[in-house]
Image: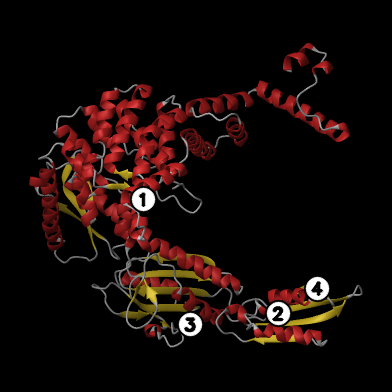
Amino acid sequence: MPELLLELFSEEIPARLQARAAEDLKTRVERELAVAPLALEGVRVFSGPRRITLVGYLPSTTPASSEEFRGPRKGAPRPAIAGFLDTKVIQPLSLPGGKLEKAIEALEAGSPYDDFIEPAIWPQASMSARAEWRDTGKGEFLYATVERPPRPAKDILCDVLPYVIRTFPWPKSMRWGNSTLTWVRPLQRILCLLDGEIVPFDLRHGEDDGHGLASGDLTEGHRIMAPGAFAVRSFAEYEAGLRERKVILDAEERARLIRDGIAGLAAREGLQVVADEGLLAEVAGLVEWPVPLLGRIDGAFMDLPVEVMRTTMRVNQRYFTLRHPDGSAAPRFALVANIEPSDSGAAVIGGNERVLRARLADARFFWDQDRKHKLEDFLPKLEDVVFHAKLGTQGERVRRLEKLAALIAPMVGADPVLAARAARLAKADLASGMVGEFPELQGIMGRYYALHGGEDPRVAEAIAAHYRPLGPADDVPREPVAIAVALADKLDQLAGFFAVGEKPTGSGDPFALRRAALGVIRIIRENGLRLGLRDLIVKHWLFLEGDIVAAWAGVLAQERLSSGDVRPSEEVLGAAAAEIRAKLPNAPALAEELSDFIAERLRIQLRSDSARHDVVAAVFGAAPDDDLVRLLARAEALRVLIESPDGANLLTAYRRAANILRIEDRKDGPHRPPADPALLRAPEEIALA
């Protein structure tokens, strides 16, 4: 089959958008061609800093097709005839609305109606249709026949591809020049070949010239090492030509070269690379011709926390961290250049070392400034940090966490005083300079600052661990104090957002409540904790309700005063508070809803862990239970029973009894409980009753 090659060449595409863009291109081209119908097979897509590319194979023409539809009987109401014609003739041919009335008039006069539309915008437009009355022997019925003649694939591509490009779904796009055409960065070239021949189209749309962009057979190599355009006639020639001109098309190959190259350089120094797949994928999207190099970290900065150095290098410079075999930080870093330096990389390395010194000096400043204060000194600043408009400030939240962590502590074997202290300090580092610069370090810096201020190591560990688990691969807290604070943090988050109606939906979960629920499940499950979630939530509502009323009522009152409410502000605030209080759920209702939500996440998790569906359904179909460990124990006990010989016999007996009952129901049923005790004879029957 003919080979389709499409490249969209632009200015630098952000690395995080490249892979998604390539998949979107594949999906949209396949979908639009399928309407023709034209099947694109063997599709591969590629992405890089300046291009997204698609290659695939498709027939040279569409197949001819003919469809016939039977409609209403003659004499049917006019709306029924109009609806049939509109659905089967007018819409498929994209005909103007006025054609419908002409078709009805022709049929009412006893004549057939024929129409044909030449190729215009859509591939399905090259179609013909006939509507006519036919005598079937059982009366006259309206028939519509729609015929689609073969069309060359090249013509269809000329129709489809401009539409795909003009409507491409970039998360963020830009306009430039006078055209309304948007792209993530200015689009510069379009390469489009079918079986080696140019597919001719441009991006004009009405009076919009589409920046004068038109398809051709030219692409470009590396911006610096091989500038200029060159022509290609096939994908093989295209890929080889790019490689000759210092561009590796495949992002996975670029990532592999980076991974292997850095690992090799590190091994020669007796070092190891700290694995970072996210950074690897990002850097592979930043370079077309990766050249790994090693630089040195100034020894004056080696006393900074390893997390600070790693985050500074990763976030600001996209450098890879190296370590000694014993896990300690090494005074080296790896970078990836986009050119082959003529001096073995000396100038590139030197420049990057100077930049890194400046970045680490900034980090040193934050580190030194933050440590001039105790962690508790940052707490007053949290009073000005809004957690959520309806849930108050971080300062208010911290006070709730203190109480809830102390409540949970005895249930998990933790010291309530230490748990309350850890909860009090858990969010303090959010107001520090370092976390303000690098939010990724929240909790981690709190641990360092707590230890520096002389806090109990268990408190410091809880501050660092209370955000965990951050994902399915992350470890859960194991120390009792950390467990208490982590559970308090997640339960407060869940209860607060559920109470104000900010619940997950099928289309979104902006406050990561599903992740919080899974965190609660994993902490309880992996630590074997016996907790009554409903009781905890009911008790926590005593702390939470007042904060919600105060915060939400304040927002509502401000809105009303801004919109012209002339009552005194105290009266407006009081009325708003009463309205909010009436709107909030009561404690038992919130506890039930939230514990059901967590149990449902557990049910989904068990099914994803390959638990038997019938076992899961039986356990969760029984009376509600907020003891997750007990639910898990029941599921395991039921599984063991069912998979044993006794369980198999029990299921056989149950099915037999159920079948007998179903048959008897058909005869003289239904037979439903309660049983009539007067009819029971055998001791076994009486015992079962």
Residue at 41% x, 65% y is 21
Percent across and percent down for residue 419 are 29, 28
Q: Which amino acid does label 3 sit on?
A: Glu
Which residue is under mark 4? 72
Q: Earlier in the sequence, mark 3 or mark 2?
A: 2
| The image quarter in which residue 243 lies | bottom left
User: Residue drawn 24% across and 64% down?
Assistant: 338
Single out the residue that lies furthest toward the front.
567
Dot in front, 2 or 4: 4
* Residue holding disc 2: 147
Tell me the SS state at disc 3: strand
**Does the rendering let one see residue 67?**
no
Q: How far apart are marks 1 and 2 (CA)?
A: 68 Å
Select label 1 or label 3 by which is in front.
1
Which numbered disc covers residue 572? 1
At label 1, the amino acid type is Val
Which quadrant is home to the C terminus? top right
